[in-house]
Amino acid sequence: MSTSEIAANGRGRLPRAGERYRPDPADLAGDLTAPLPGVAGVPLDTAVPAGFAPGASGPLKILRDAGLVIWRNVVTMRRMPDTLVTAMVQPLMFVLLFAYVFAGSLGGASYREFLLAGICVQTVTFHAAFTTVGMANDLHKGIIERFRSLPISRLAVILGRTCSDLVLNALSLAVVSVLGLLVGWRIHGSPLDAVTAYLLLLAFAFALSWVGALIGLVVRSVEVAQAVGLLWLFPLTFVSSAFVSAQNMPGPLRAFAEWNPVTAVADAARKLFGNPIPPSLPQPEGWPAQHAVSYAALCSVLIVVTFMPLAAARYRTVCSR
Amino acid sequence: MQPSHATVSLLVYPRQVARPTAGPAVAAQSLVKTYGPTRALDGVDLEIAAGTVFGLLGPNGAGKTTTVRILTTLLRPTYGRAWVAGRDVLAEPEAVRRRIGLSGQYAAVDENLTGRENLYLVGRLYGMSRSDATDRAGELLGRFRLIEEADRPSRTYSGGTRRRLDLAGALVASPPVVVLDEPTTGLDPRGRADTWEAIGELVGDGTTVLLTTQYLEEADQLASMIAVIDRGRVIAHGSAAELKARLGGERLELAVDASRDLPLAARVLAEVGTGAPVLDDRLGRASVVVEHGAGALVAALRRLEWHGVAVHDVGLHRPTLDDVFLALTGQSAHHEPERRLGRGRHRMSRSMR
């Protein structure tokens, strides 16, 4: 059949600009043996080659695919250790900076104990930028395009990225903790509380990773990702009780700091580690401070619930431009 | 049409439509893609027989990549329908993705993975088991002469090697339909020869190949059917031979003394050829489409000799696809940048006045 015949068999009407394709129900349902409209002889159906998994697209398939993406990201991290090194050196620098430059004026040894939970939150918050850059890299180097032409679950690419960045976060927290022990930080609470604190930190890291992923999928280039990916993290981290008390901030900043999830996670980690507020700083106040652990957990859940679908939707449209 | 009704139909579609095992491997119907006021595709119809190589030929920006991206489920058309390997691209994109292999215009290999790991990952994502994916990766590395580089990160590869790896990636799952978007753009002659050989082998295996190219000789070499696309429309469609036949066979060309003999030469050519001769007054060249090349050549020379015309040069010229393109669009596929340059110069001279 010639193309002109195909055209003649088609709807014969060109759409107006901006008109969306809608399948005609008559084309799609009905007679089992009727040929597809407009294509004589009906397109050839080809079986999936032997040895292939059936077309499962359920949660199992997502996890399997995400596992492969994690494998790929971890291999990449090993081959290009600059991300890994930055992720380890950055918190190290912050611990030394705050513990010896700021601590002298802010309460000495007791501030160093107070500080560590803050550094932990700051570390996992800043690591969201790695997700942004990683995602933008994959997008602009055509890897996502390749993934999209493969039968891979769409969520798996982002899930794999946020999960492999979770590995990075766990390693960084280990480095910060060891360094903290060296500068005089101690866990005074129960082991169970300490584990809860670390889980809370990782949950927050995972949540912010989804925000980072969305930004990575929105920005137009890797360079922009590097700049913007870090930009929003500064106010988020520093307008909080991570390093100082929210109570000493002026009105609007204080309100923001009190409800800032970073404050909640820092306060919760301090509570669970058993690190007291140094006498030089005012005690935290307000509902979020009093319910730091549950508020911090709630924030993480809300962030994931909000940004997972947004990132997934963005992923779906990003290559269709 | 009720949108809700359409949605319901979409859901039941995969189970309800019968799929006999004959017909084209790829079919596209009235594909339109608009970006605001721009129409990247303006009603493209295609049909590709199973087991053949189909060439989508056109200059930059003609709509080749847009067509490919729609057929490979990467892009939704504004309007139109398409089937690949018997599956509706819009209704069953997952099913289409399991049946195609795509090698894009820019080699999308993972730079930090080795060649072997790249192919392994693709195989696993198609759903292969660990051992199957490992075996298949090894097999393809051998076939594409990548054994030496197999265990080095692919960022160390040359451009051509990277393209070969990308092409191998498209073949990992032995998909029934392989889509190659400008597979040889930017390759050196050796890389191009390798790619052509690989494409030839694919057809031997019964794979359907859709390839886009700007190279007329490439489409001529590889594709049994060719669609010429320009400004989002298929402007011609057929085998290379059919497209060439559109120019009416061979062309007889003469060079004579421009001032003295050209009118006479034109009369002779009109007698032996079909259609009106084309004349170049400045160079003294005249040509005409002829049906029986050799016979027409002998006849023309005899008559010219009888008239006493001195022939400086004579030849039979088989039309190239470039001629086809010229005839179809009024412009050569190859002279896009020069035209732009010419326009620019024009504008400059006007502003200087």
Image (cartoon, coloured by chain):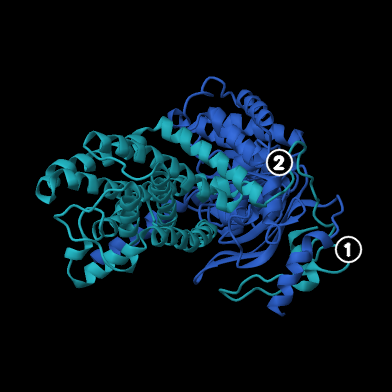
Chain colours: A cyan, B blue
- Place of residue A1 in the rendered image (x, y in percent of width and height, measured from the top left): 81, 58
The crowd level at tag 1 (other Cα within 10 Å; few <14, some 14-19, many 20+) is few
Depth check: B255 or A219 in front? A219
* For residue A297, above or below residue B160: below
Residue at the image point whose x is 13% and y is 49% from the top: A107
- Place of residue A222 in the rendered image (x, y in percent of width and height, measured from the top left): 37, 49
- Place of residue A135 in the rendered image (x, y in percent of width and height, measured from the top left): 44, 49
Query: What's the chain of the residue with tag 2?
Result: B
The crowd level at tag 2 (other Cα within 10 Å; few <14, some 14-19, many 20+) is many
Helix, strand or loop under label 1: loop
Judging by the rendered image, the residue that carries numbered circle 2 is B175
Judging by the rendered image, the residue that carries numbered circle 1 is A32
The furthest residue to the left: A105
Residue at the image point whose x is 61% and y is 64% from the top: B77
Q: Are marks 1 and 2 on the same chain?
A: no
Q: Amino acid at mark 1?
A: Leu
Helix, strand or loop under label 2: loop
Quadrant in the picture for the C terminus of chain B: bottom left
Query: What's the chain of the residue with tag 1?
Result: A
Q: Is residue A111 left or right of residue B257?
A: left
Depth check: B158 or A141 in front? A141
Q: Is residue B104 left or right of residue A34?
A: left
Q: Is residue B335 left or right of residue A36?
A: left
Can residue A86 be spotted in the picture? no
Q: Is residue B298 left or right of residue A260?
A: right
- Place of residue A84 in the rendered image (x, y in percent of width and height, measured from the top left): 36, 36
The furthest residue to the top: B148
| Distance between mark 1 and mark 2 Cα atoms | 26 Å
